[in-house]
């Protein structure tokens, strides 16, 4: 069995689907197998009329870390092009989804994971979240749409600084430049509120399990 065969944990609460990346020991990489798993899950959720919102979040202090560098190192130009196109297509389906899509960024959101968050309608973060596109230090550029979506969201000047310096932005920085709309702990509670979830007994209850 592939080690990423259950890289995503899914729970449906009423009209809200919550997808949690669940490989924290590996920094929740968006490996090719994880991307295929995400595509499979979303392909079952998008057509459902009873699902009004989809929340993407992570585990522990990690939202997700982007593409697996070990996989990238093995790509030739043709396969690298196909890998980029696959990620672009997947994230575009999220951007085009009928449902409200929310990135509940609970920690590190690095590289391609930021591209994923940018494809969502809304981004909210915990107080300890960290954002970065480290490609500038590695001599590579993101291939999953971040170069297009980031300047649309935070402006060209902010996006250039973000990409070129490869610096890490904390939640306060991200809120200041408009990358996120809210800082909240626990961030999933706020995402559920944005998605329209009703509290029961004063608390928001969510139990996660493998699909």
Image: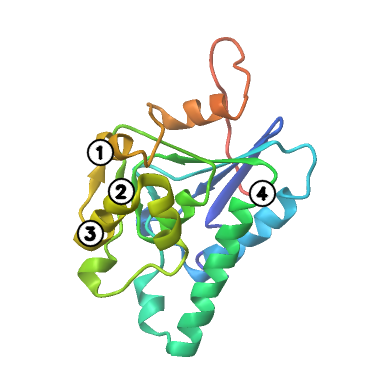
At 62% across and 24% down in the image, what residue appears? 197
Query: How many angstroms separate mark 4 from mark 3 (CA)?
Result: 30 Å
Query: How many angstroms separate mark 3 from mark 2 (CA)?
Result: 10 Å
Q: How many marks?
A: 4
Query: How many angstroms separate mark 1 from mark 3 (CA)?
Result: 14 Å
Q: Are marks 4 and 3 in contact (CB under 8 Å)?
A: no
Q: Residue 7 in the image: state x and y as whole percent.
A: 52, 57
On screen, 73 above or below 211? below
Using the rendered view, name the quadrant where residue 204 is placed.
top right
**Secondary structure under badge 3?**
loop
Query: How many angstroms separate mark 4 from mark 2 (CA)?
Result: 24 Å
Which numbered disc, 3 or 2, marks the residue that appears first in the sequence?
Answer: 2
Query: How many angstroms separate mark 1 from mark 2 (CA)?
Result: 9 Å
Which numbered disc, 1 or 2, marks the residue that appears first in the sequence?
Answer: 2
Which of 122/103 is in front? 122
Q: Which mark is residue 97?
A: 4
Q: Which mark is residue 131?
A: 2
At 27% across and 52% down in the image, what residue appears? 157
**Secondary structure under badge 2?**
strand
Side of 48 relative to 42 (left or right): right
Query: Local crowd at mark 1 within 10 Å, few (<14), some, or many (≥20)?
Result: some
Which numbered disc, 1 or 4, marks the residue that appears first in the sequence?
Answer: 4
Query: How many angstroms separate mark 1 from mark 4 (CA)?
Result: 28 Å
Which numbered disc, 4 or 2, marks the residue that appears first in the sequence?
Answer: 4
Residue on which the image places disc 3: 166
Q: Residue 205 in the image: state x and y as whole percent.
A: 57, 24
């Amino acid at each position: 069995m592939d080690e990423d065969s259950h890289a995503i944990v899914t729970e449906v609460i009423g009209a809200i689907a919550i997808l949690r990346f669940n490989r924290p020991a590996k920094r929740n990489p968006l490996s090719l197998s994880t991307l295929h798993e995400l595509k499979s899950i979303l392909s079952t959720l998008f057509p459902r009329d009873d699902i009004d919102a989809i929340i993407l979040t992570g585990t522990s202090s990690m939202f997700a870390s982007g593409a697996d560098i070990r996989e990238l190192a093995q790509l030739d130009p043709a396969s690298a092009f196909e890998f980029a196109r696959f990620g672009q297509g997947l994230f575009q389906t999220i951007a085009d989804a009928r449902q409200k899509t929310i990135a509940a960024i609970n920690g590190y959101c690095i590289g391609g994971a930021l591209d994923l968050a940018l494809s969502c309608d809304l981004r909210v973060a915990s107080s300890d979240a960290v954002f970065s596109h480290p490609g500038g230090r590695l001599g590579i550029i993101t291939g999953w749409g971040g170069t297009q979506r980031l300047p649309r969201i935070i402006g060209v000047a902010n996006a250039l600084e973000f990409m070129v310096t490869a610096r890490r932005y904390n939640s306060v920085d991200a809120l200041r430049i408009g990358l996120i709309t809210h800082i909240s702990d626990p961030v999933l509670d706020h995402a559920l509120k944005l998605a329209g979830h009703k509290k029961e007994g004063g608390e928001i209850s969510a139990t996660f399990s493998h699909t």
